[in-house]
Image (cartoon, coloured by chain):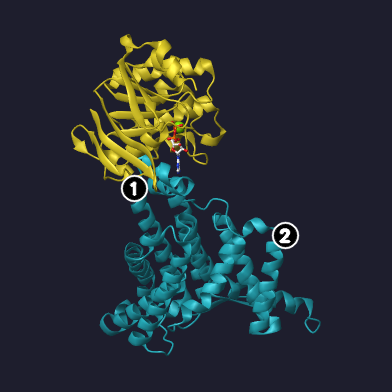
Chain colours: A cyan, B yellow
């Protein structure tokens, strides 16, 4: 890094830091959904990335519909679309849980295979419907600019997406720790058969938790459209990073998920500037390996439900 | 109130309860005594639906529950206080109490539990895991009562609890039974608690009902002999 002055370095760090925020938001939302599903049901959802892609495609569709039929609505549609993506992905999640996951709770390997199969099916479905080429929704103009602050450009979409992920995280924390349903979810994680015996409909808890995790992946997909274009395999490109977030954060801990999403996104974004794409990724992986060596409890949680 | 007929329970191939029938009338406290490993816990878990029954019938108020999942049995008026209490250790006392309640939550119901077990109100914000054994037992009973049961099942409620608190549990069970006209079925290895608490006493031996007496007809010496190894 010797060729940069201290001042330039500072600007680079701040700018890459802000561009890392978008990645952070997407990874955080992906990680939260994965951690919720894994923590609640011990299910590793290999199709989680495809739920994210579905969220992104939903935004794309809504964008087309808005442009074609309600052009006056173009500046606002994006905000509402986030909710649509959440609902669409949540509904598909509930359906998948009913069709597939609930039969496989005691068989983790089968679940892994089944969700991996599902991811392939979904990818192929996207390819048939939307084609192999990547697509992008038309984002409203207000989302595209940037604030300038001294030497530093702060992209508005980054700030927006960050705000979005803060709201989602806050709502999720409130939901899990303050709502009646969240209480049933926490007790089911602690002791599933006893939860049934005190009167909790654990079948419903499972379905809602899975749907919620998938819905949040849908929001991640909506956020993703602000930083990249969507193709059939967009989800699979993010799933590895999302798993890294969950594993290094410790799936039982929401705070851990937030922390590791931030660390991974920032490390990638800043290292990519100095080392080009793939080397940045490798360096990030090395950092994670070191973190896991120091703090192995991050790897796999203490409070996953036992059967 | 609770009518169990020809109930058969097995873990895979190993049949633990070959055939068990009994009636627990409304408002009565029925004791089931038996040595360790005789099938008390298995019977209770089958009654609440934590393990499936191979065959037979479990009726509450004439309603057949044997095929229903646990939460539906609770909704139909069965509540369970398991051996070892099994409260949720990471939930607060208050959260434990309301965990099983579905639908609207009545502050009056919570206050009623608090007046039965005042210590639960003092500790309402503490994690369940931080309570003593006796307090956890009161919490487990309170949690069960919150779902407004008609039939309350308690599996060895005195296990590992101080003698002074055992007396208190016996007293509160009688009080709750009377107050709510509740049917209570309680298992024990210790006869004295059952004699203090129950209206009738059953003896279970390797999954079978081998004796059934009204409290006043109980031949304590004889049952003690049956309980001795
Ligand atoms: N999960 C299980 N799998 C197989 N056998 C079991 C299991 N749980 C209990 N048993 C057996 O069932 C019998 C009754 O046990 P249990 O119902 O716990 O008796 P109690 O509660 O009267 O001490 C014992 O022989 C025990 O070994
Ligand atoms: Mg037992």
**Could you say which disc has been placed on residue A12 in the image?**
none
Residue closer to the observer: A242 or B43 = B43
**Could you say which disc has been placed on residue A201 in the image?**
1
Q: Position of residue B196 (x, y in %)?
A: 40, 13
> Label 1 lies in what chain?
A
> Label 2 lies in what chain?
A
Q: Is residue A294 left or right of residue B127?
A: right
Q: Is residue A35 left or right of residue B141?
A: right
Quarter of the rendering containing residue A269: bottom right
A298 in relation to A217, above or below? above
> Can the viewer see residue A226 in this picture?
no
Residue closer to the observer: B106 or B15 = B15
Name the quarter showing ligand 2: top left
Q: Position of residue A211 (x, y in %)?
A: 37, 62
Q: CA distance from mark 1 to mark 2?
A: 40 Å
Q: Is tag 1's residue or tag 2's residue first in the polypeptide sequence?
A: 1
Residue drawn at (55%, 68%) of the image = A243
Q: Is residue B74 left or right of residue A108?
A: left
Is label 1 in contact with label 2 (beta carbons under 8 Å)?
A: no
Quarter of the rendering containing residue A271: bottom right
A173 in relation to A28, above or below? above
**Could you say which disc has been placed on residue A294 in the image?**
2
Quarter of the rendering containing residue B131: top right
Element class at badge 2 = helix
């Amino acid at each position: 890094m010797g060729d940069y002055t201290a001042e330039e370095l500072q600007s680079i760090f701040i700018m890459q830091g802000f561009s890392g925020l978008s990645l952070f938001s997407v990874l955080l939302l992906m990680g939260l959904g994965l951690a919720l599903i894994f923590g609640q049901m011990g299910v590793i959802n290999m199709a989680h990335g495809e739920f994210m892609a579905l969220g992104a495609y939903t935004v794309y569709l809504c964008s087309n519909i808005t442009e074609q039929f309600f052009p006056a609505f173009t500046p606002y549609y994006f905000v509402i679309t986030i909710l649509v993506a959440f609902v669409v992905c949540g509904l598909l999640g509930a359906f998948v849980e009913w069709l597939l996951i609930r039969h496989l709770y005691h068989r983790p390997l089968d679940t892994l295979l089944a969700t991996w199969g599902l991811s392939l099916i979904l990818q192929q479905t996207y390819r048939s419907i939307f084609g192999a080429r990547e697509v992008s929704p038309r984002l409203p103009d207000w989302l595209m600019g940037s604030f300038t602050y001294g030497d530093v450009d702060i992209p508005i979409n980054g700030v927006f997406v960050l705000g979005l992920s803060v709201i989602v995280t806050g709502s999720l924390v409130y939901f899990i720790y303050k709502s009646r349903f969240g209480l049933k979810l926490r007790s089911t994680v602690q002791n599933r058969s006893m939860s049934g015996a005190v009167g909790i409909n654990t079948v419903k808890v499972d379905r809602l938790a899975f749907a919620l995790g998938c819905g949040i992946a849908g929001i991640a997909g909506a956020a993703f459209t602000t930083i990249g274009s969507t193709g059939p395999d967009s989800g699979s490109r993010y799933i590895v990073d999302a798993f890294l977030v969950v594993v290094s954060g410790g799936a039982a801990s929401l705070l851990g998920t937030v922390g590791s999403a931030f660390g991974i996104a920032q490390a990638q974004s800043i290292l990519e500037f100095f080392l080009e794409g793939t080397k940045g990724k490798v360096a990030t992986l090395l950092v994670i390996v070191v973190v896991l060596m120091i703090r192995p409890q991050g790897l796999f949680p203490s409070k996953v439900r036992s059967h | 109130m609770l009518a169990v007929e020809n109930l058969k329970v097995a873990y895979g191939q190993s049949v633990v309860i070959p055939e068990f029938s009994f009636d627990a009338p409304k408002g009565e406290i029925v004791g089931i005594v038996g040595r360790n490993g005789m099938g008390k816990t298995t019977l209770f878990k089958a009654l609440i639906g934590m393990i499936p029954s191979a065959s037979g019938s479990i009726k509450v108020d004439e309603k057949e529950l044997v095929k229903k999942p646990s939460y539906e049995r609770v909704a139909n008026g069965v509540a369970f206080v398991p051996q070892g209490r099994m409260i949720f250790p990471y939930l607060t006392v208050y959260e434990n109490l309301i965990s099983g309640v579905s639908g609207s939550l009545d502050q009056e119901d919570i206050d009623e539990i608090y007046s039965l077990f005042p210590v639960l109100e003092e500790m309402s914000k503490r994690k369940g895991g931080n309570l003593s054994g006796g307090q956890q037992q009161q919490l487990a009973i309170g949690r069960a009562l919150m779902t407004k049961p008609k039939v309350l099942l308690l599996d060895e409620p005195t296990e590992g609890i101080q003698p002074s608190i055992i007396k208190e549990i016996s007293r509160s069970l009688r009080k709750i039974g009377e107050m709510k006209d509740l049917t209570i079925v309680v298992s024990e290895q210790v006869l004295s608690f059952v004699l203090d608490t129950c209206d009738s006493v059953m003896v279970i031996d390797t999954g079978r009902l081998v004796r059934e007496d009204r409290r006043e007809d109980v031949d304590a010496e004889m049952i003690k002999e049956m309980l001795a190894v």
